[in-house]
Amino acid sequence: MTSVGRQLGSVALRYRRVGTPTRRSIAARQGPSVRWRWRRSERQTPPPTAAVGAGQAARRSRLEAVLFLASEPLSLRKLAQSANLTDATEARTLLGQLRRRYDERGGAFQVEQLAGGYQLMTRPKFAPWLRPIAPMEREIRLSAPALETLAVVAYRQPVLRAEVEAIRGVACGEILRQLMERDLLRIVGRSEELGRPLRYGTTKRFLEVFGLCNLDQLPFWSQLVRATRAAEPDDSLSLSAASIADSADDVADA
């Protein structure tokens, strides 16, 4: 080899030595134990898709915990704040996933949309077993006059007391007061008529009791008539004077 060749070889060797060592060259010099540690760390590092899936599952679990402890329906915004989610859109997406999971495995729970929010509830088929152990204070019993008064207010709100009494044909002041005490009715304003009488409307508790998301879900009169005719004889639709008198006598017991 000429002198020029030896000089070029020495220069190439120096550059090779001062260059940045590769992981393979380091592992080759330090032995098989280092290579094994690198391979093990590579296997333990989760792929990006798995990390994203785990994060979504954690957020879904937080949302499920919030629903489990909530004593009333919560809005999407409130759910997002309580579960530390990004926004209401993410809360809606995770709620849809929870619903599908409950339906697929036929669990005892379901996510219901009512009273302007969402709540975790048991399925209706378990009611016979749960009713004996359910808190009695949550059960609301209404007499027929109270139900009639509540129905008039629900469909005609905001409505005056005089309008309710004109429809029912009896005094309704005491029933309206009792329905307000049970948080089913509330005062929504005053009329511009003489004396500025009060106007009545339903509450959020009313929607919860009857399983409604909003007032738009109230059935139409035609639907009620068809359901009643299907369940009862035709002559049961006519109210006699005696039944109206009985309703008037039951006002004090509503």
Image (spheres, helix red, strand yellow):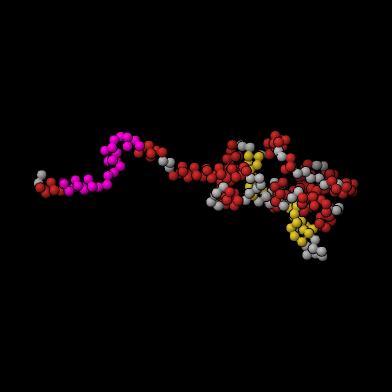
Q: Taking the image as drawn, is residue 222 in sight?
A: no
| Range shown magenta | 9-37
At a point 77% along the width and 53% down the height, the residue shown is: 153
Where is residue 227 drawn, in percent x and y? 76, 45
At a point 59% along the width and 36% down the height, the residue shown is: 105
Magenta includes 28? yes
At a point 66% along the width and 39% down the height, the residue shown is: 123
Measured along the vertical axis of the image, is residue 221 above or below residue 65?
A: below
The secondary structure that dominates the magenta segment is helix
User: From the viewer's perspective, is 87 left or right of 144?
Assistant: left
Magenta includes 24? yes
Quarter of the figure that contains the N terminus: top left
Where is residue 162 drawn, in percent x and y? 83, 58
Measured along the vertical axis of the image, is residue 215 above or below residue 98?
A: below
Where is residue 194 drawn, in percent x and y? 82, 65
User: From the viewer's perspective, is 218 left or right of 254?
Assistant: left
User: From the viewer's perspective, is 90 left or right of 129?
Assistant: left
